[in-house]
Image (tube, rainbow, N blue to C red):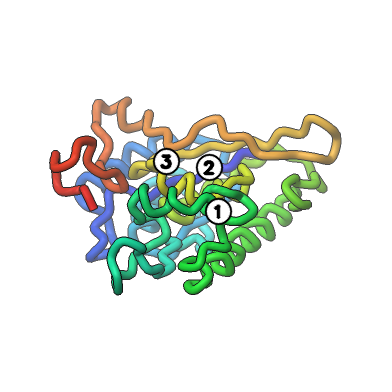
Amino acid sequence: MKLLLIRHGDPDYELDNLTPAGKLEAQYLAERIAPMPVTQYYLSPLGRAQATAAPTLKAAGREGVTFDWLQEFSIPVARPDLEGMSTVPWDWLPQDWLADPRLRSPEHWKENEIFRAAHVGEEYDKVVNAFDALLAEHGYERDGELYRVRRANTETLVFFCHLGVACVILSHLLCCSPMNLWHNVALLPTSVTILNSEERRPGTAIFRASAIGDISHLYAHQTEPSFACRFCEIYGNGDRID
């Protein structure tokens, strides 16, 4: 089985849609994804993800299935360095989240006091449980950190979603803390993350990533990726510092 996690194009968050650059990115993405032998497309209900999927679905002559649990993982949490300010779990300063070793642990990241107060762990579990229920329908049933293969197949499932929730799913599949992915991996607009099942012994599988955040479809059109989700390379070199 192959899984593709696709982030939406360059976003206009105010309108929950795509910018002109994002719409062009979505067209280039469609050239790449639509010819693939995709078993099913799954979509976030948010406008920017739906708009990103639209050119691919049109080119492929297909329809997608929308799931609420694929929407962005925007759980409000307190930001440690700014009293009274709420943010999302992937928007802490490095010196704050790295100060708590539990946040880097697959077993203990949910124990952080701010996360516990905001029920981040419970919301994470809702997403990954829904994701596992879907994989079970396609023949792969979660058992601890492995998957039991009830119906081996080479299906391809495509998920049009968002940075935060894609990192949630990716952390679940790779058995690591989502904090490492939220803060150390930039899934740029329309990037494609690819995972394949590996069944090295009959009936037992894991998923291995062969690409994380791939944007080769943009480079094929000599198009630089949008900057969304990154911060400036040098302090003060731009307005993305905080």
Query: On the image, numbered disc 1 is attached to which residue?
Result: 102
Identify the amino acid type marked 3.
Val
**Residue 32 image position (x, y, % from top left):** 42, 34
Query: On the image, numbered disc 3 is attached to which residue?
Result: 185
**Closer to the observer: label 2 or label 1?**
1
Q: Quick one: label 3, few (<14), some, or many (20+) residues within 10 Å?
A: some
**Closer to the observer: label 3 or label 1?**
1
Q: Earlier in the sequence, mark 3 or mark 1?
A: 1
Q: Earlier in the sequence, mark 2 or mark 1?
A: 2
Identify the amino acid type marked 2.
Leu
Query: On the image, numbered disc 2 is attached to which residue?
Result: 4
**Residue 152 image position (x, y, % from top left):** 78, 40
User: Would you place residue 113 above or below residue 151 in this image?
Assistant: below
51, 177: nearer the viewer: 177
Which element is circle 2 on?
A: strand
Q: Image check: 120 left or right of 172?
A: left
**Residue 96 image position (x, y, % from top left):** 38, 54
The residue lying furthest to the front in this view is 99
Identify the amino acid type marked 1.
Arg
Q: Earlier in the sequence, mark 3 or mark 2?
A: 2
**Closer to the observer: label 3 or label 2?**
3
Q: Quick one: label 1, few (<14), some, or many (20+) residues within 10 Å?
A: some
Residue drawn at the location 54% of the way across and 68% of the way down: 123
**Residue 38 image position (x, y, % from top left):** 56, 42
Query: How far separated are the C-alphas under marks 2 and 1?
Result: 29 Å
